[in-house]
Image (spheres, rainbow, N blue to C red):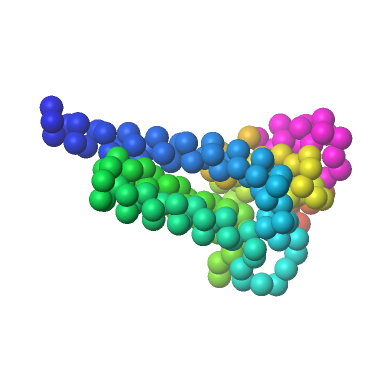
């Protein structure tokens, strides 16, 4: 039984933290980044030629928090170490899904044409289809509502959006 718990507890902490981080990332994206933290996040919603943007400072803050939890977890409170693992796994997922897949901040390009990845891709493009910080939809990074539901929310918010958000860079529709 002790052996089972020695694997079960860390697994629950890691998986639970990854799930929690998606909720927390969506909440902080909507209420902090599109709120009082807009000064940094605005750089992410504007065209630019730089490799880095001021918005990347949010990732640095989350990484510093994870490093602190690794340190505290190693020295005093072991569950915090596993929570830091969950935060780090979420950070890797965020990097691949958001920076890689959606914003193509890596050398190769891939535009998903079906399934889950297509849904995430479309949802975040619809998030960026609104000018400014108000009235946006889809604040999560790993979970995404279907595009038609997000379009309906944009219409309910009385926000004009760029319909090209449902196309890829070659102007081919990637809609449902």
- Residue at left 37%, top 37%? 15
Residue 74 in sight = yes
- Residue at left 39%, top 55%? 67
| x and y percentages locating residue 108 in the rendered image | 56, 67
Find the magenta span and give its range. 146-161
The image quadrant that residue 119 belongs to is: top right
Is 159 magenta? The answer is yes
- Residue at left 71%, top 61%? 43
**Left/right of residue 67 with respect to residue 131 in the rendered view:** left
**Left/right of residue 31 with respect to residue 59 in the rendered view:** right
Is 72 magenta? The answer is no
On-image quarter of the N terminus:
top left
Residue at the extreme top: 1
Total marks in image = 0
| x and y percentages locating residue 63 in the rendered image | 46, 56
Residue at the extreme front: 76
On-image quarter of the C terminus:
top right
Q: Is residue 61 above or below residue 19?
A: below
Residue 144 in sight = no
The answer to which of 156 and 118 lies nearer the viewer is 156
- Residue at left 86%, top 35%? 158
| x and y percentages locating residue 100 in the rendered image | 55, 59
| x and y percentages locating residue 87 in the rendered image | 42, 47
Q: Main secondary structure of the magenta part?
A: helix
**Left/right of residue 67 with respect to residue 171 in the rendered view:** left
The image quadrant that residue 54 belongs to is: bottom right
Q: Is residue 18 above or below residue 88?
A: above
The answer to which of 51 and 105 lies nearer the viewer is 51
**Left/right of residue 172 with respect to residue 68 in the rendered view:** right
The answer to which of 53 and 71 lies nearer the viewer is 71
């Amino acid at each position: 039984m002790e052996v089972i718990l020695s694997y079960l507890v860390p697994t629950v902490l890691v998986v639970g933290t990854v799930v929690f981080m998606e909720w927390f990332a969506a909440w902080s994206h909507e209420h902090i980044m599109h709120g009082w933290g807009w000064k940094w996040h605005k750089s992410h919603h504007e065209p630019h030629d730089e490799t880095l943007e001021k918005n990347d400072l949010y990732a640095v803050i989350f990484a510093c928090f994870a490093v602190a939890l690794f340190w505290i977890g190693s020295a005093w409170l072991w569950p915090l170490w596993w929570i830091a693992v969950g935060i780090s796994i979420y950070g890797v997922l965020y990097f691949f899904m958001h920076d890689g897949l959606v914003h193509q901040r890596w050398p190769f390009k891939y535009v998903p044409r079906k399934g889950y990845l297509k849904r995430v891709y479309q949802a975040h493009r619809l998030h960026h289809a609104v000018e400014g910080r108000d009235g946006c939809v889809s604040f999560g990074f790993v979970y995404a509502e279907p595009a038609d539901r997000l379009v309906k929310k944009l219409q309910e918010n009385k926000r004009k959006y760029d319909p090209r958000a449902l196309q890829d860079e070659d102007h081919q529709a990637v809609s449902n």
